[in-house]
Image (cartoon, rainbow, N blue to C red):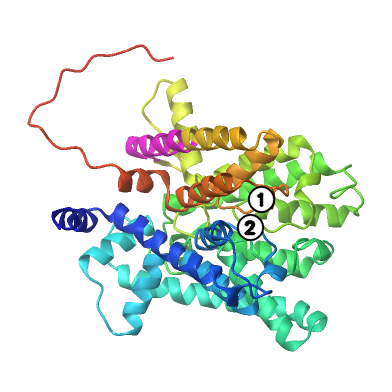
C-alpha cells in the first residue's frame, strides 16, 4: 500500500511521468482492441506484438506497420486505428481536455501543467482558449483536406468508399501519421496526380508548422512576429527546398523511382517526398528502390522532422537551428546567438544540445541492438527504420513486416521516445535530484 501511495504521489508531482503513462495507457487499450478478432479482416486474433506495434505507431502518429492496413484490418479495425491517429495527432492530454470541455468540467491545475508540457507551452494563462483553437483548427483543416481529396476519390471509388478514403487520408496526413487505406503501394498510383499529392503535402506541412505559428500569422495582436514563427517558417522553407532539390538530383536518372517521369512529375514527386520526410510517411514511389545517397539524405531530413507545437516528430527544426547558431557562436568566440535581429538564449542552446545528444545516443543504442538481432539484413535498411521510428515518420525500405518480435518492440519504444521527446521520457523515468545542502567543488577538464 505504501508503494502504491508513493507511486501515486510521484505521478502527481511529475508531469512527464503522467504524460508517459497516459500515452502508454492509450497504446495498451489500442493493442487490446486490435488483438481481438473483430479488428482483423479474417476474424482471427492478431499477434500481440503486431497489435502493440500498430497501436504504438498510430498513437505516436508514425505510420510504420508490419501488416497492410487496407487488407489486414477489418473496417472496425481501421476505424480504431484512425481514432488512435486522431488522439495521437491532437495529443492525448489535448483529447482529455477536449472531453472535459464537452462535459462542462473545468481543467484543474495539474491538467493544465500536463497540457502545457504536451504542447511545449511556457505559460499557463490562456491554455483553455489555446485548446479550443487547436480543436477548431484541426477539424477545419482536416475537413477541408477531406473535401479536396474526395473530389479525386469519389469518382474513382464511389461515394461512400471515396468519402471514407478521403477522410482517412486527410486525418492521417494532418496528424503526420502516414497510414493509408490504399494498400501496400501507398500513393504510388497517384504519382501523376498533383491534386492528391499537393493536398496531402499541404496538410503535412501545415500540421508540421505548429499551432503557435497559426496564431502568430492570423491572430496576432501586434505587428511583430515572434522569433519562434520566423525560425519555424524559415527552416521549413529551407528544408523543403533542400529536400526537393536533393531528391530530384539524386533520383533524376533512377528508373525505379522518378527516372521514367517527365520533368513536371519528377519535380512533383521530389517535392512530395521532401514533404513526407517531415514525419508523414506517405510515399509516391518505392523507398527501397532509392539510391544509397538518397536514403541517407532522407535519414537526415527524417531526423530533423517538423516543428514544435504541432503534430510532427523528430529533433525539430528550431532545435537544429539553435544548434547551428551555437556552433557558429563557439567558432566565433561569442556568447551571442543572433538570428532575425534577436538573440536566442544560452538556455535554448543547452536544451537543444541535450535533445540532440540524447537522441543520438538512443538511435545508436537501438540501432546496434537491432543489428544484433537482424544480422541478415542490410544496415542501411535497419538504420532507415530506426530513424523513421524516432522521427515518427513511417517510411520504410520494406522490412517492417519481416522484423523479429524483439526488433519490433525496440522500434515501437523508439516511436514513443520520438513522440514524447527525450527530455520528457528521461524525466519520467529518472527521479529528480535531491538538494543535499551543499555542492562539491568544481574542476575543469579538457574537452575536444
Q: Nearer the viewer, residue 65 or 283?
A: 65
Measured as percent of width and height from the top left, residue 92 is found at 41, 66
Kindly identify which residue carries mark 1: 400
Query: What kind of element bears circle 1?
Result: helix
355 with respect to 390 (left or right): left
Kindly identify which residue carries mark 2: 65
Query: What kind of element bears circle 2?
Result: loop
Determine crowd level at label 1: few under 14, some 14-19, many 20+ residues with C-alpha closer than 10 A: some
Query: Residue drawn at (36%, 78%), measured in percent from left and top?
Result: 99
Q: Is the magenta stretch mostly helix, strand or loop?
A: helix
**Disc 1 to disc 2, C-alpha distance:** 6 Å
Is residue 354 located in the magenta-colored stretch of the structure? yes
Looking at the image, which residue sits at the far front? 44
Q: Nearer the viewer, residue 73 or 203?
A: 73
Residues at marks 1 and 2 touching, judged by CB atoms closer than 8 Å: yes
Instruction: Quadrant for the N terminus, please.
Output: bottom left
Measured as percent of width and height from the top left, residue 54 is found at 57, 61
Measured as percent of width and height from the top left, residue 93 is found at 36, 66
105 with respect to 269 (left or right): left
Q: What stretch is highlighted in magenta?
A: 343-359
Instruction: Let me know if residue 400 appears in the view.
Output: yes
**Residue 264, above or below 134:** above
Determine crowd level at label 2: few under 14, some 14-19, many 20+ residues with C-alpha closer than 10 A: many
The image quarter containing residue 149 is bottom right
Amino acid at each position: 500500500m505504501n508503494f502504491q501511495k508513493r507511486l501515486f504521489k510521484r505521478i502527481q508531482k511529475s508531469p512527464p511521468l503522467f504524460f508517459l503513462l497516459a500515452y502508454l495507457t492509450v497504446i495498451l487499450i489500442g493493442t487490446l482492441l486490435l488483438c481481438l478478432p473483430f479488428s482483423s479482416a479474417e476474424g482471427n486474433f492478431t499477434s500481440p506484438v503486431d497489435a502493440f506495434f500498430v497501436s504504438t505507431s498510430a498513437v505516436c502518429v508514425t505510420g510504420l506497420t508490419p501488416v497492410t492496413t487496407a487488407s489486414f484490418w477489418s473496417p472496425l479495425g481501421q476505424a480504431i486505428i484512425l481514432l488512435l491517429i486522431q488522439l495521437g495527432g491532437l495529443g492525448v492530454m489535448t483529447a482529455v481536455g477536449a472531453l472535459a470541455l464537452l462535459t462542462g468540467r473545468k481543467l484543474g491545475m495539474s491538467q493544465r501543467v500536463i497540457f502545457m508540457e504536451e504542447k511545449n507551452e511556457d505559460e499557463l494563462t490562456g491554455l483553455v482558449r489555446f485548446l479550443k483553437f487547436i480543436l477548431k483548427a484541426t477539424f477545419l483543416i482536416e475537413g477541408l483536406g477531406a473535401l479536396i481529396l474526395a473530389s479525386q476519390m469519389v469518382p474513382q471509388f464511389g461515394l461512400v468508399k471515396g468519402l471514407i478514403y478521403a477522410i482517412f487520408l486527410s486525418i492521417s496526413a494532418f496528424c503526420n501519421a502516414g497510414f493509408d487505406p490504399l494498400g501496400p503501394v501507398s500513393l504510388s498510383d497517384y504519382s501523376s496526380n498533383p491534386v492528391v499529392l499537393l493536398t496531402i503535402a499541404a496538410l503535412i506541412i501545415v500540421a508540421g508548422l505548429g499551432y503557435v505559428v497559426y496564431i502568430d500569422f492570423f491572430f496576432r495582436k501586434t505587428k511583430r512576429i515572434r522569433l519562434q514563427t520566423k525560425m519555424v517558417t524559415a527552416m521549413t522553407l529551407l528544408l523543403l527546398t533542400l529536400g526537393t532539390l536533393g531528391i530530384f538530383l539524386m533520383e533524376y536518372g533512377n528508373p525505379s523511382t522518378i527516372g521514367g517521369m517527365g520533368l513536371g512529375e519528377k519535380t512533383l514527386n521530389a517535392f512530395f517526398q521532401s514533404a513526407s520526410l517531415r514525419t508523414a510517411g506517405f510515399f509516391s514511389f518505392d523507398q527501397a528502390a532509392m539510391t544509397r545517397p538518397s536514403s541517407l539524405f532522407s535519414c537526415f531530413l527524417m531526423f530533423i522532422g517538423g516543428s514544435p507545437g504541432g503534430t510532427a516528430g523528430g529533433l525539430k527544426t528550431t532545435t537544429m537551428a539553435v544548434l547551428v547558431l551555437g556552433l557558429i557562436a563557439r567558432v566565433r568566440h561569442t556568447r551571442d546567438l543572433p538570428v532575425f535581429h534577436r538573440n536566442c538564449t544560452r538556455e535554448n542552446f543547452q536544451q537543444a544540445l541535450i535533445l540532440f545528444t540524447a537522441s543520438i545516443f538512443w538511435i545508436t543504442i537501438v540501432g546496434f541492438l537491432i543489428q544484433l538481432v537482424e544480422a541478415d539484413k542490410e544496415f542501411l535498411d535497419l538504420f532507415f527504420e530506426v530513424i523513421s521510428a524516432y522521427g515518427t515518420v513511417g517510411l520504410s525500405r520494406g522490412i517492417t513486416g519481416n522484423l523479429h518480435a524483439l526488433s519490433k518492440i525496440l522500434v515501437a519504444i523508439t516511436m514513443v521516445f520520438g513522440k514524447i521527446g527525450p527530455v520528457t521520457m528521461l524525466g519520467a523515468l529518472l527521479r529528480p535530484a535531491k538538494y543535499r545542502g551543499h555542492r562539491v567543488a568544481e574542476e575543469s577538464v579538457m574537452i575536444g
